[in-house]
Amino acid sequence: MLFPLESAIRAEAKTVAESDDYDIVIVGSGISGAIIAKQAAEAGKRVLILEAGTGANVTLAGYDNLLTTFYSAASKDNQSPFPVNANAAMPRSPQLRKLQAGETDSSSYIVQSGPYVSDTVYTRIFGGTTMHWEAKTPRLLRSDFKTRTLFGQGLDWPLSFEEVEEDYHLAEREIGVSANVEDQQYLGQTFPNDYVFPMRGLPLSYLDQQVNKGIEGTSVELYDKTYPLKVRPYPQGRNSIPNPAYDGGKGYRPIGAVDTHQVEEGGRCQGNTNCVPLCPVQARYHSGKTLAKAFAVNGKRGERLVELLPQAVASKVNIDPDSGKVRSLEVKIYKDPASPAHETITVKGKVFVLAAGAIETARLMLASGLRSTSGLVGRNLMDHAYLLNWALMPEICGTMRGTSSTGGIVDLRDGPFRERQAAFAIDIHNDGWGWATGAPTSDLLELVDDRNLYGADLRHGMINQVSRQLLLAFMIEVMPVESNRIAVDPQYTDALGNMRPILSFTVPEYTMKGAAYGRQFARTVFTRLGAQDHTRYDPGDFGYVAYEGQGYAIRGGNHLAGTHIMGTTKTNSVVDKNQRSWDHENLYLVGGGSMPTIGTANVTLTLAAMCFRSGRDILKSLH
Amino acid sequence: MYSYSIKTLDELKEFLYRAMQLEHATIPPYLTALYSIKSGVNQDATQVLRVIVVEEMLHLTIAANILNAIGGTPDLVRPDFVVSYPAALPDGETDFKVSIQAFGRDALATFLKIERPAQRPEHLVGNGLIYRKTPAHITALASHPRHEDLHFYSIGEFYSTIVEGIKYLEAEAHGAGTTIFIGDSSRQITSEYYYSGGGELFPVTDLKSALEAIELIIEQGEGDGGGIYDDDDHELAHYYRFEELVKGRYYQKGDQPGHPTGPQLQVDWEGAYPIKENLKVGDIFEGTELREAAIAFNTRYGEFLQLLTRAYNGQPSLLLEAVPMMFEFRNMILELIRNPLPKHPGKNGSPTYEIPGGIKQPAVTRQAEVNA
């Protein structure tokens, strides 16, 4: 039916404040909160989800409005569809500038205290960062769970791959991952005999195929070991062909979206290149799909079990000093995104889940002044370091066709070299040099302004220039370092008076060593392809990092992790292996922030898998 | 058994061919109305139309599945498959014309008639077919192959005849120890190739699945026995979605037909390009870009039907190739609709849907076969 859902699921602030029978209160409607909400509702629990954004995009019309905003925006960065909302502000990369030594920049939402300026972003609206993620869903490798033991780097997880494997299956089902098992069997990744992904793998793009043609059968040497090269398809959280063999032959049925009408419940991927920031046909998974299912669950008396309270910014976690348990949350409810006017309510529940992303969850914990035995809240901040390398292919190879990234060179995700330098996965970008240079706008300006082209010459010039563009994005491992952190300070607050996150980050030496090797690697690949290297890192770039006499522009990957790290004891970590706070029995801190390492896998699939585990633990604690 | 019943398998095949023709015939008017809407206005109307176009494509595919199930050969390139607009549809005692026209009150009035639930009043039950009043050169959709001068009371009656025919022929075959469902099951289009298209696509292999398939087509169009929703209460029938636009208000669960009580919606009746109704290529000046664009669209649309024909004849994976073609249509149609039509002041161009015969195999499809 084509009918706005919101009236049915939106809670009233007053009713929420007076309720004392929520089993679970969740902060954040991203994938973590959505999975736990759905699991809890299916077990008959009452759930309240607090969402800082307006929730307007819960309807199809609201989703379409985001698209309209994006289409008409001058800057096509990954936050451009999302309206400015000072009450739930979010970081945005075009607002960044280079820092001078010792300088702090508080002009944008995240206070950058350096020395490295991170352009990492996350989205504070209904659906969280799944509203703009790229939807690549590789798993962590077995070795990524024990890098301390194997390579003397980073931290070991308190869990092995084997303990997480079943939850990976659940996460792949929830997201509806498209992939072929045979493509993912590399670097020791194995699958049960009868395992198939929910949907078949998306085909490699023509650009991927052209790159593969140039490198397949070649190899590179690294510390006396040979690594063969080829382009492999990525598993992806976007709709392809449902695999009829899924679920023992029952097949997979792609369902669920912001609207209940089937046509809008996620069409098949049409190869629109603007997957990031927003898929026009909802082929790409976002947590609204999981939430649509959660909202549809009714209790015994026919009441809806999951409620959403939008425009609700969790501002303080109140602890009972005797038990150490969370007693309530203080929540600021604003009436209008354009005004800081708000009322403050107190929300009570049995279990509280902070699922607001690695930065906001840590920020809320720190702003609440909570005691932490390990002292690690906000520390060990991680994000993949991206190094971009771009070149022109010798022939037109169809750049701008297909989704953002369909394949990559991923055989250097693991190896004994990780004792000395970071591993990386290389994404081949089907959307040209956009991330690196602002193409194709920059190409148009150059052809018109510098080369005076017009008419047919201009059209041919654009095709010749843009459809040969190859961008290799090296996604480089970053290990946990305690000094890389999120902090708060009362002098930096937002419109509602909540303390803003302060980010301090240094790109670790281990990672820079991987970056330097990556640059060489890119040159090798370009040579084999006969492609002309156009890579240039500007010392004025906000992400510029000098290493061993060379300069590199490092980009954030928006794969945030580590700020409430998971471990074996309350002194070496913030949460246990179920993502339960060591210090506060009825508090769960979920999401990337719990991950002790991120290897070379985008974090969403793994954090989604972890939330299934936490959901079970929460339900157990409620019995 | 009245004299208009289906009595042979060949006749049933012809009826199913006409069902495909009927299901397809609604696509050009809906698609044209959809793309005639100016960007930035009529968001609700755009969604309603888009959803319905997709469901009509589903119905077309379902009809092909039924035809395949009984060993028929879907053929969308037969010269009469795409009708010449305006075409006539049964409307009770009379019929009415379906045109290619811009979104607006007139178009919507026609669309409501197309999807209108129509059952014979008591006193007319069993009275047989009705004499056509439209001139013979106008294509009569959902007509009876043996009685071109007559028409059914409604689309519902046309489909009922098919249902009765299937039941009769299957019972007859059953009596002889055989079945009419002898089609190659690998020709069935399943949800693997077509999903989220407004309903579940399932293989038709026997009497039960064939009847379910027809039921789905009827319910999505007219609703379930007069109710506003289809059988599982999940979706509004097309008729009531169009009615929402006319009434400016959404239906919600529990509403009675004709009385939506949900939130209001806005329709900008002027928010569409003023295209010339039922335009023909011959009406456009020779040598103009507009004429070239109209011809190019018709050619490409013909290739699309060729592709569908092959997809429905044992190569279901070719349906994947149809997706990028649909994008081309949008661009090609917009080119026509947004430009003024010479010698017709105040009117814009339009796709004409005059589909040439003898379409050559499109290049993209040959490539797909090599890959397959």
Image: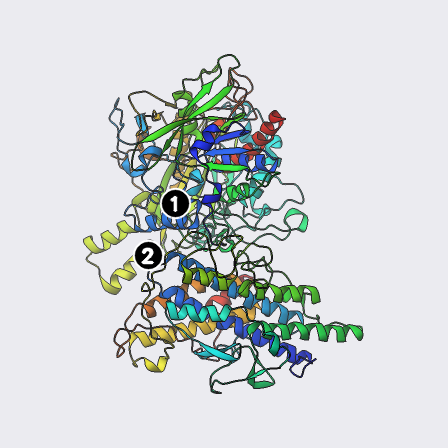
Along the line of sight, the residue nearer the viewer: A472 or A139: A139
Along the line of sight, the residue nearer the viewer: B189 or A351: A351
Q: Which residue is mark 2?
A: B40
Please name which of the two marks, 1 or 2, marks the residue nearer to the observer: 2
Q: Position of residue A477 (x, y in %)?
A: 45, 32
Q: Position of residue A520 (x, y in %)?
A: 38, 38
Q: Quadrant of residue B31?
A: bottom left
Q: Which residue is mark 1?
A: A277
Vertical comparison of B236 with B284: above or below: above
Amino acid type of the residue tagged 1 in the rendering: Pro
Amino acid type of the residue tagged 2 in the rendering: Gly
Q: Residue furthest front?
A: B123
Along the line of sight, the residue nearer the viewer: A460 or B58: B58
Counting every numbered tag in the picture gives 2
Kindly identify which chain the residue marked by label 1 belongs to.
A
Name the secondary structure under disc 1.
loop
> Do marks 1 and 2 share a subunit?
no
Q: Does the residue at mark 1 contact the one at mark 2 (Cβ under 8 Å)?
A: no
Color encoding of the figure:
rainbow
Q: Position of residue A19 (x, y in %)?
A: 50, 29
Q: Is residue A157 left or right of residue A314?
A: right
- The 10 Å Cα crowd at callout 1, few under 14, some 14 to 19, many 20 or more, is many
Q: Quadrant of residue A611?
A: top right
In what quadrant of the picture does the C terminus of chain A appear? top right
Vertical comparison of A70 with B317: above or below: above
Q: Which mark is residue A178?
A: none
